[in-house]
Amino acid sequence: MATNVLASSQAEPLDVAGGLSQRFLRSFMAQVEDWCDVCRRLSVWEERRLVDEPTTEDFSEHARILEELERTGRWVALVTQNPDFPDAAAAELVAMTLKDIADRRALWHGTMTPEQREKVLTSIFDES
């Protein structure tokens, strides 16, 4: 026989939420961390595939990756930019990461001159 999970007994008060928002937040923050990790690892991919002699396929793949990261970031930002979102630092990280994605798009797929691009790449990847 099925029991009604929302029914409470006299001895146990009804607590439907039971920390639900905290569990959602914990799960959501894990997803934010996953997204940020992938965004950070993109630099390694760019250095390997785009710095020296990129192919047309490399640029196409990069544009696809940026689109996916940006789309997912916009979903994340819908939550983090809500005034009720409790973690201001995470909200700022999401906003900065979305800006970084836009900057990457401008760098690799925008209208920078080769000289401008070289200057930016040197400042990012120069190990000296």
Image (cartoon, rainbow, N blue to C red):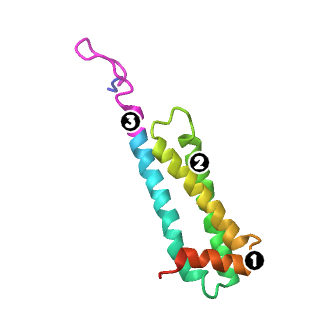
Q: CA distance from mark 2 to mark 3?
A: 19 Å
- Select label 3 or label 1 by which is in front: 1
- Residue at numbered disc 1: 113
Q: Position of residue 55 (x, y in %)?
A: 67, 85
As for residue 3 lying within the magenta part, the answer is no
Report the disc number at residue 75.
2
Residue positioned 41% across, 51% down in the render: 30
The amino acid beneath tag 3 is Gln
**Up-down: is 29 above or below 116?**
above
Residue positioned 54% across, 82% down in the render: 48
Write the start and end of the magenta stretch as one range.
5-24
Marked residue nearer the N-terminal end (2 or 1)? 2
Q: Residue furthest bottom?
A: 53
Secondary structure, mark 1, is loop
Q: Residues within 10 Å of mark 1 (few under 14, many from 20)?
A: few
The answer to whether the residues at label 2 and label 1 have Cβ atoms under 8 Å apart is: no
Q: Please identify the quarter of the rendering in which residue 62 is found.
A: bottom right
Residue positioned 52% across, 63% down in the render: 39
Q: Position of residue 61 (x, y in %)?
A: 64, 74
Secondary structure, mark 2, is helix
As for residue 20 lying within the magenta part, the answer is yes
